[in-house]
Structures are given as structure tokens and as C-alpha cells.
Amino acid sequence: MCLAIPGKIKSIETQMNGLVRMAKVQFGGIYKEASLEMVPKAKKGDYVLVHVGVAISIVNEEEARKTFEYLKEAGELDELEPASIDQLKDK
Amino acid sequence: MKYLSEYRNPELVARYLEEIKKTVTQPWTIMEVCGGQTHSLVKNGILDLLPKDITMVHGPGCPVCVTPLALIDKAIKLALENQVILCSYGDMLRVPGSEKSLLEAKAEGADIRILYSPLEAVKIAQENPDREVVFFAVGFETTAPANALSVLHAERLQLKNYSILASHVLVPPAISALMSDPDTVVQGFLAAGHVCTIMGLEEYYPLAEQYNVPIVVTGFEPVDLLQGILMVVQQLEKGQTLLQNQYSRMVSEEGNPNAKEVIEQVFERTDRMWRGMSVIPQSGYKVRENFREFDANEKYSIWTVDTPEHAECIAGDIMKGLKKPVQCSQFGKKCKPSNPLGAPMVSSEGACAAYYHYSGQTELVETT
């Protein structure tokens, strides 16, 4: 549950009267919203390590790619798309 | 059993294994604290590849596993009796409370939603002003900034219908508790990488010094884990007790100061009950007094009864590293992921579930 996943910032918008910077982050084929409040220097095109909707650090592109490929191959990307209640029941 | 060629970086894996074998001259017991690392070690078959002299024991670092029964009961009551919209990370849904799980409460009509992020729960509160929304905020330090941030977002939006049921736990006090136990078998630690991405290394220097134990902050991939184990073994063989950072590409000395500030703003340290262990002093976070309107524990008076754990469950001994899952009389018999007697069988990061799912590999370990 403490796994953070690297993704690329595709766009940034401010919310709550400019108080909050939210990014659209791409993880392979999956897009998620993530807060940039912990990484104020992050900008569009940067790679960030994201955990439960919050970017926790900026990482370099090569490291981000390698880590993402590993997580994908190992089948460790469930966090991005949590199972629905119905899927859980079927388990 | 994995073949070396299946790893992303088989040459490096082979090199670290060779180094470990060359370095080890006597038996050592090393604990990985983090459930994500347990999962990776077992799933990737690393336990099979290590020399026999190295015993890996699996620590209490699965937040789902250490969340007390009483708190799960509270979440269920909030959903069923107070009829709140109860939002949670998916991992918590199937954990059995004293009578039922959140999933079973859902079947009885409770409004329970699985979310990716607590920030989504704030949105749900915004969109449902006539409903109360509670987020079940479990997790270690890695998850704390997101849970804290949800409270700040709710405050900025002046929401009156959002609160969190916080069950946060912290790694360093757990290491202290484990090392203070006279029965401890642990001689070295792998500390959790992403926890330290947030918190930095500061809290770990005094632990290594006080308990005379090597601690290596380590990542999650097989290569990281093997390098971390090698670093611990090298220290043990030399009689060193240092804090080292294997995961410097993701972990800096000071961590993430912005994240630490948000945590500090919303949470304060408190004694916390760890399921299967005991109350560990100052080992968790609770919501600060000035944010009490966002604290589900303050907002709702909920009575729960302390229920003892299943008599045959040895979760406590497993999380202290005293026993392995396969040493439990009910492992894979009465206790399975579909019918867990204790929490480590529920979450994929729990040691018992990891062993159960990849048991082909673990049988090999246990018989060698």
C-alpha cells in the first residue's frame, strides 16, 4: 500500500481559487488526477512519483520509465485502478 | 521457482546474489518492515535464491493488517447505523471486523465506495452536501500526506460534511518496539523506501545507534531488495550498525519537506494499537484538535467492543518475525484469503497472503 508509481505530467490546472495545483498524470494508458502541492516545482512534462492521488517527488525520466516498466511487468499497477465492489465480491 | 533470466536485470540480480553468498559466513536474520517488500520478495522468488544462512522475516508494515478490529467495526457502524458514505482504499474492504467486513456491510445496504485517493472523497462530499462522507484513512507515512491533504482541501472548501477515520501508523516506533522485545530475533532491517521518500532518514540514525542494528533504506524491485540485503549482510559480517540508503534515487536525506509540513499541520502523534501486536507508544497519527470537525472519531460517538483475535491466529508472532506463516496450524486450511482468520491473510501485502498466493515457492524455502 505504500507503493508510489511514476507518471508524466500532461497538464496542470489550478483549483480552489488558485490554492491548489492539480495535474493530469499519465501512467502508460491510464490517466489520473494528482495534487502537486508536495512538489511545488513540478511542471508540465516532468515525471513525478504519485501515491494515492498525491505527487510526492519529481523523478528523472529514465528512472520513471524503468520503474514503471517493472511495475507493469510485475502486475503491480492495481492501485491506479482499484477493483470495484463487484469485482471484490467475485474474488 | 523463478529463473534468473526472468528478472528485469538478470545480470545484476546474479551479481548481488553471488556477492551475498561470498559475504555470508554465519546465519543472520533480517526483517523487511514493509508489506510491499514482503510481497515483492515472495512473489519474485527471492527467498528461494538467498543462501540458507539468511533468514528473512516479515515485519508489521502492512497498514491493512495492523488496523485494529475495533476500528473496522467503527467504520462498519458509521456506514450501517450513521448511514454515512464510507470511502476507503480497496484493500480494507474484505478485512473481517468482529462480526463482518465492510464488503458484507455493503451487501446489507451500506453506502461504501472504493477510491483511489482521499481527494476523491472530498469531491464526493462536495457533490453530496446533504450526506456525511467519511474516509477510512489507514496507512503509513507514505499515505499520510494524501490523507492530511484531504482535510486541508475540505477546510478550504468549507465543507461541513467531510471527516476522516484516521488509523495511521509509523515505522520508526514499530522498529523500536520490535527491538525492545527481549525475544527479538531480528539482527538487521530493510527500511521502507517510499516511507522515507516522505520522511527522510533523520529518525533512523538514532534507531541504528540505540539498538545496535544495521538499517538499510531499500526499494521494492528485486535488484533493490538484493542490494539492500547485501548491504545489511556486509554490515553484519563487519560488526557495523549503520544507517545506509540503498534507494537514494528516490530517497533524500531530508525527505519531502512540503509533505512533512502538511502532515505536521493536520496530524499529531499518538499511541496506537497495532492489530496482532500491542499498543505502541507514539506510533500513530491522530487529527489535531484544531481540525477536530474533520475527525470522525470526534464527530461521531461510536461504541465498539474489544473483540479478541481468533484463538488460532498467530499474526502477532509472524509480524514480530518469530514465526513464518507456514508454521501456523491453520495456514491454508481454515485460514485462506477467501476466509481469513487474521489480517495478514487478507491484504496482498500481508505475509500470510503472500505465502499463500505463491506457496509453490515458499514450500521450497521451508523444506531446504
Image (cartoon, rainbow, N blue to C red):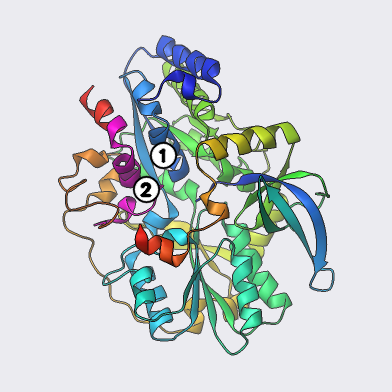
Evaluate whether residue B202 shows in this view.
yes
Q: How many marks?
A: 2
Rendered image: mark on residue B249: none
Q: Tell me whether the residue at label 2 lies in contact with that at label 1, contact meaning CB atoms closer than 8 angstroms.
A: yes
Q: Which residue appears farthest toward the top when viewing the image? A: B22
Is B274 or B102 nearer to us in this picture? Answer: B102
> Which quadrant would residue B304 be assigned to in this image?
bottom left
Image position, residue A20 (x, y; %): 78, 65
The segment highlighted magenta reads B340-361
**Measuring 64% from the left and 67% from the top, which residue is drawn there?**
B119
First-in-chain label (2 vs 1) = 1
Is A66 or B214 nearer to us in this picture? Answer: A66
Whether residue B343 is in magenta: the answer is: yes
Same subunit, tags 2 and 1: yes
Q: Amino acid at mark 2?
A: Gly
Above or below, A45 against B44 in this view is below
Quarter of the picture holding the C terminus of chain B: top left
Residue under label 1:
B38
Image position, residue B262 (x, y; %): 68, 61
Crowd tier of the residue under label 1, counting other residues whose Cα lies within 10 Å: few below 14, some 14–19, many 20 or above: many
Is B157 situated left or right of B21 in this image? Answer: right
**Measuring 28% from the left and 40% from the top, which residue is drawn there?**
B182
Evaluate whether residue B319 shows in this view.
no
Rendered image: mark on residue B350: 2
Numbered disc 1: what chain? B
